[in-house]
Amino acid sequence: MTGFDTFYTLNDGTRLPKIGFGTYNEEFADNEKPIFEAIEAGYRFFDTASLYETERYLGNAIKKSGINREEFIIETKLWIDEMGYDGAKKALEKSLKRLGMDYVDIYMIHWPRETGDEDEDWKKLDRETWKAMEEMVDEGIVKRLGVSNFLPHHLENLLAGCNIPPVVDQLELHPGYSQEKALVYLKEHDILPMAWSPLGRGRENATVGNSVLVKLAAKYGRSVQQINLRFLLQKDILPIPKASSKEHMISNANVFDFELTEDEISMLSCMPQTAWLNEHPDFYIPEKKSNPDNI
Ligand SMILES: NC(=O)c1ccc[n+]([C@@H]2O[C@H](COP(=O)([O-])OP(=O)(O)OC[C@H]3O[C@@H](n4cnc5c(N)ncnc54)[C@H](OP(=O)(O)O)[C@@H]3O)[C@@H](O)[C@H]2O)c1
């Protein structure tokens, strides 16, 4: 069994492979090779975003693979400067064009706030954006909806006024940043947590510089990265690791033949939260603008 032939069931009854592939990487911006290799390695669930400038390369790699579009789950996100009712509609149009597709499987709001200013009416902005996204589902150009970086208070606002609840919430999650309160909320509301930067983006304190992870890796004869992924899976979280080498791609999917003990999961969940990337959804204001149309 690998991450490709075992599945999570979403709150709308559909299934997602337990391991997806992240495409946020500078080197992907001018190169569809790693994405094509991920398809060859067996990945069928891909995460991208308007911001990443990888939508076009993902679309090209899928066409080149000769595998039917229907066999893939494609997830993309609208960026903070694309929020609002009209903004969302235009954003999807552009994403579909870049992907060369006529629908996406999961469409997400990337961050819950646009400016992070104290007087920003983010509650209204999120609801208006969501209304446009629900219409996309009705039109069939989006199959289901998701959010990203939504904490319980952001979800509370959305769930109070929506007709279609999100199926997933993509959060920074890995040993050393496991957002336990958000996980409890998501479980209560039947929203699948998805882990971005599941390998702590390769930072030392989230991987090889973390003595607890290193010890467990030695015990199981696995890489530290495989311990990270196992930890997330045993907490019913879907990780979307990014990898450039085929060796990493394959090893990230092969984490279903060993199990951490309950004590080890507890130990990792209770580690000091020292490996956070420092991007708080209420205060982080990224500078980069959404994808130019030609990329
Ligand atoms: N929603 C959001 O706000 C948000 C934010 C950030 C990311 N994301 C999504 O989450 C995805 C994953 O996060 P990420 O790209 O930040 O980082 P990540 O997946 O946590 O880490 C990627 C790093 O780990 C290395 N790596 C991968 N597999 C490995 C292995 N088996 N052994 C050793 N090293 C390995 C990669 O190196 P190589 O490339 O050399 O293989 C790369 O340096 C992104 O690509 C994106 O799709 C979403």
Image: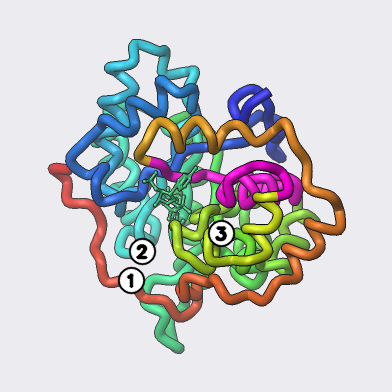
Magenta span of residues: 219-243
Residue pictured at 35% horizontal, 49% vertical: 24
Q: How many marks?
A: 3
The amino acid at mark 2 is Ile
Q: Quadrant of residue 4?
A: top right
The reply to whether the magenta stretch includes residue 82 is no
User: Who's the residue at 21% across and 36% down the image?
Assistant: 31
CB of residue at label 3: within 8 Å of ligand 1?
A: yes
Which quadrant of the view contains residue 187? bottom right
- x, y (%) of residue 165? 64, 49
Residue 241 lies within the magenta run = yes
Disc 3 crowd rating (10 Å Cα; few below 14, some 14-19, many 20+) is many
**Residue at image mark 2:** 80
Q: Are marks 1 and 2 in contact (CB under 8 Å)?
A: yes
The image position of residue 22, as x and y in percent, is: 43, 43
State whether residue 157 appears in this view: no
Mark 1 → mark 2, Cα distance in angstroms: 9 Å
What residue would you read off at disc 3? 171
Tell me if label 1 and label 3 are in contact, CB under 8 Å.
no
Eye-nearest disc, 1 or 2: 1
